[in-house]
Structure formats: structure tokens, C-alpha cells
């Protein structure tokens, strides 16, 4: 325990750092900036277009991520996302509006392609911050959204491959014929899969096998700042593929998947959500910037906390993947990945007025 003198010394140091940070972040941005996870180049461009035409920063980033939510080929977000264990696409999203310091969130929502818009509706039209499950879908329906089937053929193929192959790769499996069970050979799945799904092309089957064995995490986090220094953010995802129905990751959790404080900036995340929830990553990134860290230092600080969850044991950590994004109120930004380096480079998307581009993430550990 800290004694009184240590506490006062610490508090004084903290106050000094906070004042320094306030000076550093006190100026309005000179030009608008939008950043997102690597899958968001088009989203950043769209958000920038809205910001430049005078739109609100939250409307801008939502318009950006709607592109990814509606894209059936992005299998980690919105329509076309990989489903839960029951084959149902289950989505999570949250938004934070910096200028009014408000937030909204939905989790485990079904049947609605653009959960980010429903999160904003929660923020705008209710006294609540978070609505989950069937309640969230009914809430969307009450606002005129139609419940739709979000499972594409591609995602369903991957789900069936997972059902059939992963649970018992070389053993008895209820989901394949007896003949196939007897011939099961987990080491060379493609011929078997081809026989089983004759209408599906080889590339899709190879991808489905990869997804079955390494369920993806994939999400878009997007944060935007205008020239007045106003900042907002959104995070939206279909979460972990093949999750237990009802599993909620970090993405819709204010303070984990996203945190925006208009006095400081924003922090967001993609990757293994459980690691982020356990370290309140979005909030930690913002608090680190508040206390004087640069965006780069802030994302690395949060990655160290993730690493610390496993006593920095790289053998365990190398099986995990997580990124954090930071956008400071003055327009400085960075992203950091647990793993990176020349052999496994990680990027994030940036748009500061021209074309969207990828910039490299800083990283805590280098992949051998
Ligand atoms: N963070 C998301 C989740 O855990 C997934 C991801 O970002 O890939 O649900």
C-alpha cells in the first residue's frame, strides 16, 4: 500500500503530467483526420467526404463503416459476417459522440445489417446506453428496420465446414456421412471437402478450412476528427466466428472496443476481444494520452498490459492477435499490434484529406 507521502508525490507527478498533456492536446486540429483498422480504407475516405462537406463526425464515421457492414465479402463485420455456433450472424457495435459526450451500443443483435446505426439510435432516442439480443433487434424493428437473413452462402459454407471438420477432424462426426467418417483424413481436407461441396470453388473451400481451424476475429474501428477538433468513433463487428450464441466481445463495450473523450482523443481496438475487455483497452489508451503519452506510446502501453495478462509469455501470446488505435485531439495518431515486424507487418488506414492509405502499426513483439 502507498503511504501518504508517496500518494502526495504520485498525485503531484500525475497533476504535472496532466497539465503537460492538456497543453499538448489543447489545440484544435489543423486538418481533419480519419483513421481505422486496416480493412477501412474505403470507410475512411467516405468519412472524410462527410466531414469535409460539414457533416457531424459521428455521422461521418458511421457512413464510413456502413460500407464494410453492407459488404458481403467482409466476413468479419455486418452482412456476410461469419455466424455463431448455431449458424446465426450475431453483431455487436458501439458509437461515441465526442461533442456531446454521449454513447450508444448494441450487442448480440440479429437480422440487422448495420448495427452501428442502431447503436446511434440507442444513443439518440433512449435513456439507455446498451441494448442486447432480441431486445436490440426489436428496438431496430420499432424504428423501421427489417429483420433480414445475414448469412451469405459463403459464410454458411465456412460454418458447415467448421461443423463437419473441426469438432472431430479425424474421428466420428455426426455431421458427415458414415462413409466419410470412416475415411476421414484431417491432413488433406480439400479432396474430401470438394466431394462434399461439389459446387463450391477450391479457393472458397481452402478459405473455409482456414476459417474452421483458425476462427477469425475481424472488426472495424473508425475514429474521425474535424478541423474544429470535434471527435467521434464507432466500432462494429460480427465478433468471433463460431462463438457460443450470446458471447459478446469488446467491440460494443464502451471503454474497451471504443472510448472517446473530447478533451483528449479516442482509443479503439480490433482482435481478441477478451484480452481487451480484461484491460479496458480503449479507455487505457485515452487515459495514457491524457497523462502525456503520445498515441504511439499509449497503444504500446496498452499492449504491455495485454502481454502482462500472460506474464509476458510469448509462447502463449504468439497465438493471440490484437490491435489498438489512437487518435489524439490535435490530429496525431497511431496504431499498435501485439505482433508485427517485417515478416508479419500490420497496418491501419488513414485519411487526412487525399486518398486513404495504409500506415504501419507499431508492435510489441516481432514475429520470428
Ligand atoms: N474484437 C472483436 C471481438 O472480440 C473481434 C475482432 O476485432 O476481430 O468480438
Image: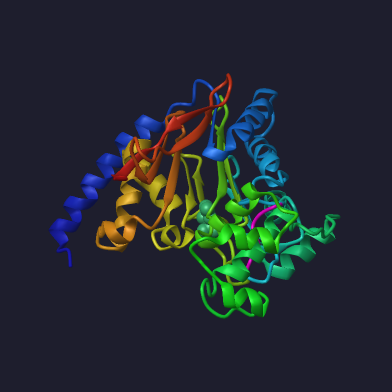
The image position of residue 269, as x and y in percent, is 48, 49
Q: Nearer the viewer, residue 351 or 129?
A: 351
The image position of residue 179, as x and y in percent, is 65, 77
The image position of residue 237, as x and y in percent, is 61, 53
Q: Is residue 95 above or below residue 159?
A: above
Q: Is residue 110 above or below residue 9?
A: below
Number of numbered callouts drawn: 0
Q: Is residue 30 visible?
A: yes
At 20% across and 52% down in the image, what residue appears?
Answer: 10
Magenta region, mostly helix, strand or loop? loop
Q: Is residue 2 left or right of residue 32?
A: left
Q: Nearer the viewer, residue 245 or 199?
A: 199
The image position of residue 289, as x and y in percent, is 37, 41
Q: Is residue 108 left or right of residue 35?
A: right
Q: Is residue 110 magenta?
A: no
Residue 175 appears in which quarter of the rendering?
bottom right
Q: Quadrant of the N terminus?
A: bottom left
- Magenta-colored span: 80-84
Q: Is residue 163 above or below residue 215?
A: below
At 68% across and 61% down in the image, what residue appears?
Answer: 195
Residue 366 appears in which quarter of the rendering?
top left
Q: Is residue 271 left or right of residue 158?
A: left
Q: Is residue 254 visible?
A: no
Q: How is the image coloured?
A: rainbow
Residue 56 appears in which quarter of the rendering?
top right
Q: Quadrant of the C terminus?
A: top left
Q: Nearer the viewer, residue 269 or 7?
A: 269
At 29% across and 63% down in the image, what residue appears?
Answer: 310
At 62% across and 63% down in the image, what residue appears?
Answer: 192
Amino acid at each position: 500500500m502507498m503511504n501518504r507521502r508517496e500518494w502526495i508525490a504520485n498525485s503531484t507527478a500525475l497533476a504535472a503530467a496532466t497539465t503537460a498533456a492538456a497543453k499538448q492536446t489543447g489545440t484544435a486540429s489543423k486538418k481533419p483526420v480519419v483513421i481505422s483498422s486496416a480493412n477501412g480504407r474505403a470507410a475512411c475516405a467516405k468519412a472524410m467526404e462527410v466531414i469535409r462537406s460539414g457533416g457531424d463526425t459521428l455521422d461521418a464515421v458511421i457512413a464510413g463503416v456502413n460500407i464494410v457492414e453492407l459488404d458481403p465479402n467482409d466476413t468479419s463485420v455486418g452482412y456476410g459476417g461469419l455466424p455463431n455456433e448455431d449458424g446465426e450472424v450475431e453483431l455487436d457495435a458501439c458509437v461515441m459522440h465526442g461533442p456531446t459526450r454521449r454513447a450508444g451500443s448494441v450487442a448480440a443483435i440479429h437480422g440487422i445489417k448495420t448495427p452501428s446505426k442502431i447503436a446511434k439510435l440507442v444513443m439518440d432516442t433512449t435513456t439507455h446506453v446498451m441494448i442486447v439480443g432480441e431486445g436490440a433487434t426489436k428496438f431496430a424493428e420499432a424504428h423501421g428496420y427489417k429483420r433480414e437473413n445475414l448469412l451469405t452462402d459463403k459464410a454458411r459454407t465456412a460454418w458447415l465446414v467448421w461443423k463437419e471438420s473441426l469438432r472431430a477432424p479425424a474421428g466420428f462426426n455426426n455431421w458427415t456421412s458414415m462413409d466419410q467418417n470412416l475415411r476421414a483424413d484431417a491432413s488433406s481436407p480439400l479432396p474430401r471437402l470438394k466431394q462434399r461441396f461439389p459446387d463450391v470453388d477450391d479457393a472458397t473451400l481452402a478459405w473455409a478450412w482456414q476459417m474452421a481451424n483458425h476462427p477469425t476475429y475481424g472488426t472495424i474501428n473508425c475514429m474521425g476528427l474535424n478541423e474544429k477538433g470535434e471527435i467521434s468513433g464507432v466500432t462494429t463487428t460480427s465478433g468471433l466466428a463460431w462463438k457460443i450464441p450470446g458471447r459478446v466481445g469488446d467491440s460494443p463495450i464502451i471503454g474497451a472496443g471504443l472510448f472517446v473523450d473530447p478533451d483528449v482523443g479516442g482509443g479503439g481496438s480490433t482482435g481478441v476481444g477478451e484480452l481487451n475487455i480484461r484491460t479496458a483497452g480503449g479507455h487505457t489508451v485515452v487515459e495514457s494520452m491524457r497523462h502525456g503519452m503520445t498515441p504511439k506510446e499509449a497503444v504500446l502501453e496498452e499492449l504491455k498490459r495485454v502481454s502482462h495478462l500472460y506474464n509476458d509469455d510469448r509462447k502463449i501470446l504468439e497465438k493471440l492477435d490484437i490491435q489498438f488505435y489512437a487518435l489524439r485531439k490535435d490530429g496525431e495518431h497511431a496504431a499498435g499490434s501485439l505482433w508485427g515486424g517485417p515478416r508479419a507487418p500490420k497496418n491501419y488506414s488513414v485519411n487526412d484529406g487525399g486518398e486513404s492509405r495504409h500506415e504501419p502499426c507499431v508492435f510489441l513483439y516481432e514475429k520470428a
